[in-house]
Amino acid sequence: MDPVRNPYAPGAGQRPPELAGRDRELQQFEIVLERVARGRPERSMVITGLRGVGKTVLLNTFKSMAMQRLWGTGKIEARPDQSIRRPVAAALHLAIRELAPRHRAPERIEEFLGVLKAFAMRDPSAAKGTSHWSPGIDVPASRGRADSGDLEIDLTELFVDAAGVATDLGVGIALFIDEMQDVQTPDVSALCAACHELSQSGGPLIVVGAGLPHLPSVLSASKSYSERLFRYARIDRLDREAADLALIAPAESEGVEFTQEALDALYEAADGYPYFVQAYGKVAWDLALRSPITADDIRVSAPEAEEELAVGFFGSRYERATPAERDYMHAMAAIGDEPVATAEVAEGLGRKPSSLSPARDSLIKKGLIYSAERGLIAFTVPHFGKFLRSQPA
């Protein structure tokens, strides 16, 4: 069939043509927006899940929902080697720029921008007397507000002032943080403290984070009250009905159908994971001769889809690991696909657990595995164990 009309979209953070199976999360965020708009106290929100389940897609959808309500929005992607000070400053700068044309007091905007500039330039990691950040803010940096150098103090003051600008307009500000598990430990503490202050004052600024399944434990280790600070939403694979809808709805818009046997085969292959659903659907469309797409089309196309996943989705991650880290992951895969005990991995390698700590910690930092709970580890990528068992050790 015509590949130009192919509706399926496997990609990093790329919204599928049909966002199936996420109605509950969308409704939850709608409630958050509505409560904040009415001045009701509301928690910030955190989405967690494995890679490929659509966290970034959902985060971007939330951002669009906030923008439709004329909120100020900004988004960052956390990196383990970078403080959030300047990325947050840049994101809030964008958010305020969205609000500024509707504000009746330009001096209020300038006052906040002065605080924002001072916050961004007060980076303790930068060489003394230097600043490489070019925020495009023409007003002079303020003094005595959000510029102490202590991120917890500064971020709290910045959030409070930003919320004040939003209050003037009767709207809110939403800061979206992708890969939130990679926020540095001191910065996580500062972020939680700032959100805690906002939750007490009722300021209309929320933080919406997305990260791997161990993100709640990262937040909890930083501030004990984080369990009550955020509204948590764990997303996983799609159920059969949602997975079928993700395939059927886009195809119907192009006048194409699937047989029931084809849908059965696709669900078995993709296992309900949104990225895999798009990947298998795309190749099946390209190789099918006509509508309806049949189970035979799936059998022919599945090997090509698996090859693309092996290179782009699994292989790119596998290549990032050192030989010692690969040995560790192969030992995990040999045990099974469920979370495995670190002691079992060590036993499989014939090593002491303590000697394997560097490899384990490095894999966690690279986002290839995560600590499911104390003493247990798991892959961050679904079906990664199956992929590794097909590779030479």
Image: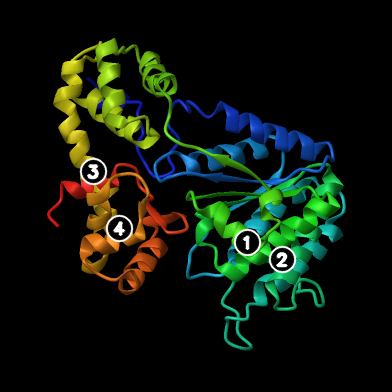
Disc 4 marks a residue whose amino acid type is Glu
Image quarter of residue 113:
bottom right
User: Eyeballing the image, is 109 above or below 46?
Assistant: below
- Nearer mark to the viewer, of 2 and 4: 4
Q: Which mark is residue 344?
A: 4
| Mark 3 and mark 2: Cα distance apart in space | 43 Å
The residue where tag 3 is placed is 386
| Mark 1 and mark 3: Cα distance apart in space | 38 Å
Name the quarter where the N terminus is drawn: top left
Disc 3 marks a residue whose amino acid type is Lys
Sequence-wise first label, 2 or 4: 2
| Mark 2 and mark 1: Cα distance apart in space | 9 Å
- Nearer mark to the viewer, of 3 and 2: 3
The residue where tag 1 is placed is 88
User: Eyeballing the image, is 143 above or below 225?
Assistant: below
Q: Residues within 10 Å of mark 4 (few under 14, many from 20)?
A: some
Image quarter of residue 130:
bottom right
| Mark 1 and mark 4: Cα distance apart in space | 41 Å
Q: Measuring 35% from the left and 63% from the top, which residue is drawn there?
A: 363
Image quarter of residue 195:
bottom right
Q: Are marks 3 and 2 in contact (CB under 8 Å)?
A: no
Sequence-wise first label, 3 or 2: 2
